[in-house]
């Protein structure tokens, strides 16, 4: 997140994906500092909506949309936004995108909207979105900000999908409504559908993620 | 240094832009959202009346099923009967809407009765914000299924059901939800208001 990206990318001299900065940003958001598994942000919604894979996917899509949209506009306006009210401006932009998505769901995916309940609206207060706007989009050019928004949204979506898949599989023996574990030998574990199941699964996901990624270089020093 | 005027102008422009965008989105999606809400209400009437329909039916299909089977009949200003008349034409069941204050927010639903208007056939709640896990359990099958077959009058013929404590032995009683006495009382009250009207109207 140095200013290098701005110099490389700001003047419209984008080579490749923002002069090589793009891939790093993408990897950072989706992997090395994954918002859920590493930064442990936005877990309220992650625990609440992951009882089924379908819900997790829609929630992930919502966050990608909001992150990309808000990062883009915060970045576009970053040189014009008065410093004192930048946070209010960020929230206004974020809220606009969240409500847009919510309205869209209510109009065309009513059942999904009912299942997600208040959690779509609560994306407004999701730390990931605000965090990316404040920490990244304010200092970086639009294209790179879009990449960052997408990367973080994607990182969140994938982690959510993994948790959702585990909970749905063990909680109801299905994935996306397809019966995978036959009822003849597998008794669905109700605990996985309920809140404690989310905590267990989330903990295991964080552990596995960290085991694959290896120890943090800064921490191990 | 950018002055206060700039900050004000900036806020005004940003606010207006966001508001305009949201207004446009709301206006564009309103007809779809309204149709969904209407279908949701119809779904509840159909469920309460136990009209057979495919669970995966779309909003449009639901409206079609509803229009083919249900006739709305105003009994008075406050009481509308939703009559279930299958293709054969005879009255199969009838539903009424009930509404009232719950513990936290309005509770609304439909109560369906057999054609005699004295025996309960089914009940649904389509709007409630009661405490999840306690009062919110009024929407569960376990609670709702108790109503089927119950009488809407007590042994002396007075209108009303009882959502009581513990297992109820009388014809018009159902077992309330432990820990949700307030919700149960309020639901009982709003249902009984409608039942009184039905019994009065039948006299």
Image (spheres, coloured by chain):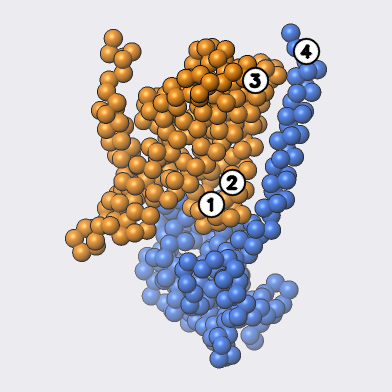
Residue placed at 70% from the left, 72% from the top?
Answer: B78
In this rendering, position of residue B93 left or right of residue B164: right
Callout 2: SS: helix
The secondary structure type at the circle numbered 4 is: loop
Q: Chain of mark 3?
A: A
Both on one chain, marks 3 and 2?
Answer: yes
Q: Are marks 1 and 2 in contact (CB under 8 Å)?
A: yes
Q: Residue at x 61, y 38 (%)?
A: A97
- Same chain for the residues at labels 1 and 3, yes or no? yes
Q: Colour of chain B?
A: blue
Callout 1 touching callout 3 (CB < 8 Å): no
Label 4: few (<14), some (14–19) or many (≥20) C-alpha neighbours in 10 Å: few
- Residue A14, position in %: x, y? 56, 21
Residue B77, horizontal then vertical, whole percent: 73, 73
How far apart marks 4 and 3 lie (CA) works out to: 17 Å
Q: Which badge, 1 or 2, comes first in the chain's sequence? A: 2
Q: Are marks 4 and 3 in contact (CB under 8 Å)?
A: no
Whether residues under marks 3 and 2 lie with C-beta atoms below 8 angstroms apart, the answer is no
Q: Is residue B27 above or below residue A147?
A: below
Query: Marks 1 and 2, how far apart in space?
Result: 8 Å
* Marks 1 and 3, the one that precedes in the sequence: 3
Q: Which mark is residue A78?
A: 3
Above or below, A202 against A191 in this view is above
Q: Residue at position x 40%, y 38% from top? A: A158
Whether tag 2 and tag 4 are in contact, CB under 8 A, the answer is no
Residue labelled with disc 2: A102
Could you confirm whether marks 4 and 3 are on the same chain? no
Instruction: Work out whether mark 3 precedes mark 2 in sequence or the reverse, and give the earlier one.
Output: 3
Q: Which residue is mark 1?
A: A113
């Amino acid at each position: 997140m140095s200013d290098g990206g701005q110099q490389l990318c700001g003047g419209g001299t984008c080579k490749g994906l923002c002069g090589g900065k793009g891939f790093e940003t993408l990897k950072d958001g989706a992997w090395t500092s994954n918002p859920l598994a590493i930064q442990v942000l936005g877990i309220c919604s992650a625990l609440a909506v992951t009882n089924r894979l379908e819900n997790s996917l829609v929630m992930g899509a919502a966050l990608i949309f909001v992150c990309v949209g808000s990062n883009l506009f915060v970045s576009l306006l970053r040189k014009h936004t008065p410093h004192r009210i930048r946070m209010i401006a960020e929230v206004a932009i974020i809220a606009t995108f969240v409500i847009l998505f919510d309205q869209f769901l209510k109009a065309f995916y009513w059942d999904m909207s009912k299942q997600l309940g208040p959690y779509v609206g609560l994306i407004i207060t999701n730390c990931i979105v605000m965090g990316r706007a404040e920490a990244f989009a304010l200092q970086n050019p639009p294209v790179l900000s879009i990449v960052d928004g997408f990367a973080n949204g994607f990182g969140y979506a994938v982690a959510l999908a993994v948790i959702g898949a585990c909970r749905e599989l063990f909680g109801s023996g299905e994935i996306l409504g397809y019966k995978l574990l036959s009822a003849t030998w597998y008794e669905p574990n109700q605990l996985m559908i309920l809140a404690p199941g989310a905590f267990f699964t989330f903990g295991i996901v964080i552990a596995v993620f960290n085991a694959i990624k290896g120890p943090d270089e800064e921490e191990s020093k | 240094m950018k002055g206060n005027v700039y900050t004000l102008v900036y806020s005004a422009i940003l606010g207006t832009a966001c508001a305009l965008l949201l207004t446009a989105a709301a206006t564009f999606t309103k007809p779809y959202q309204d149709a969904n809400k209407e279908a949701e209400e119809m779904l509840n009437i159909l469920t309460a009346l136990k009209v057979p329909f495919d669970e995966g039916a779309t909003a449009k299909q639901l409206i079609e099923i509803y229009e083919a089977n249900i006739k709305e009949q105003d009994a008075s200003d406050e009481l509308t009967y939703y009559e279930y008349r299958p293709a054969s034409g005879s009255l199969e069941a009838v539903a009424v809407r009930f509404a009232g204050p719950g513990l936290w927010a309005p509770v609304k639903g439909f109560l369906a009765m057999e054609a005699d208007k004295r025996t309960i056939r089914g009940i649904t709640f389509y709007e409630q914000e009661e405490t999840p896990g306690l009062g919110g359990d009024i929407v569960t099958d376990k609670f709702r299924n108790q109503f089927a077959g119950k009488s809407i009058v007590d042994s002396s013929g007075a209108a009303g059901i009882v959502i009581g404590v513990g297992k109820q032995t009388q014809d018009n009683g159902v077992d309330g939800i432990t820990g949700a006495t307030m919700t149960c009382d309020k639901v009982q009250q709003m249902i009984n208001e409608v039942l009184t009207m039905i019994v009065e109207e039948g006299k």
